[in-house]
Image: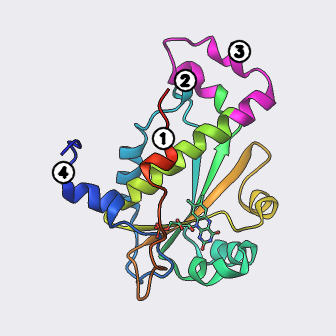
Amino acid sequence: MSLVLDPAAQDLLFREARTANTFTDEPVTEEQVQAIYDLVKYGPTAFNQTPLRVVLVRSAEARERLVPLMAEGNQAKTATAPLVAILAADNEFHEELPKLFPAFPQAKDAFFAERPARESAAAMNAALQAAYFIVGVRAAGLAAGPMTGFDFAGVQKEFLDDDHTPLMIVNIGKPGDDAWYPRSPRLAYDEVVTTV
Ligand SMILES: Cc1cc2nc3c(=O)[nH]c(=O)nc-3n(C[C@H](O)[C@H](O)[C@H](O)COP(=O)(O)O)c2cc1C
C-alpha cells in the first residue's frame, strides 16, 4: 500500500527476481543492453561522477580468455551464459566531471586531484551503478548472475588497464533449467533499521 510502483514491477525487480546460475541459449541483444544502460544511467552517483564502465564479452575468443579466470564454481555458468559483462570502476572518471557536473566544474581539482581519492570514490559509486545495472537487467525481463569469484588481477590484465578496476562480472540471460538455489532468508526490518 505504501509503494507507488506497480506490484507486478515490484515482483519483476525484486520479489520474484532471482540470481540465475543457468541460462537458456536465447541471445541477449545489443538493443537490450543499450535499453538497460539508457535506463540505469539515471541512477544517482556522487557529483554525478558515473564511474562505471562495462565490457561486454561477446566473442568466443574473449570468453575463452575469461572463463579460466573465474573461480571453479563460476566457470560453467560463465561459459554458457548468453552474455557476460565485466563491470569496472574508472579511476580516471574525474576527466569527465566538468561535463558531468557542470554545476560545480571545480570538483575535478578540488576533490579528485589525488588518485587515492578517486579510487575510493570510483569503487563506491561504480558499485552503486552495478546495483542499478542488475536491477536494469531485471527490468528487461532478463536474469543477472553477478559474481565476484574471479581473479581480479587477471581480469584487469586481460580485459582492462591500470586505470580500470574490476568490480564484478555479471552473467545475463533468460534463466535456464534449475536456475537458482533455494531463496535465502533476508534480515527483517527490525534487524536492520534503527531510529534515533
Ligand atoms: C556482488 C556479488 C557477488 C557475487 N558473487 C558470486 C559468485 O562469485 N558466485 C556465485 O555463485 N554467486 C555469487 N553471487 C550471488 C549471490 O550469492 C546471490 O545474489 C544472493 O545469494 C541472492 O540470491 P537470490 O537473488 O537468488 O535471492 C554474488 C552476488 C553479488 C551481488
Residue 193: mark in rendering = 1
Residue 77 percent across, percent down from the top left: 57, 80
Judge whether 154 appears above or below 35 on screen: below
Cα distance in 3D space between marks 1 and 3: 37 Å
Q: Secondary structure at mark 3?
A: helix
Viewer-nearest of discs 1 and 3: 1
- The first of marks 1 and 3 along the sequence is 3
Report which residue position mark 2 lands on.
Answer: 47
Residue extending farthest bottom:
177
CB at mark 3 closer than 8 A to ligand 1? no
Cα distance in 3D space between marks 4 and 2: 30 Å
- Please report the residue visible at 43 percent of the width from the left and 87 percent of the height from the top: 178
Count neighbours of disc 4 (C-alpha within 10 A) and say few if under 14, some if 14 to 19, many if 20 or more: few
Amino acid, disc 1: Val
Report which residue position mark 3 lands on.
Answer: 109
Magenta span: predominant SS is helix
Amino acid, disc 3: Asp
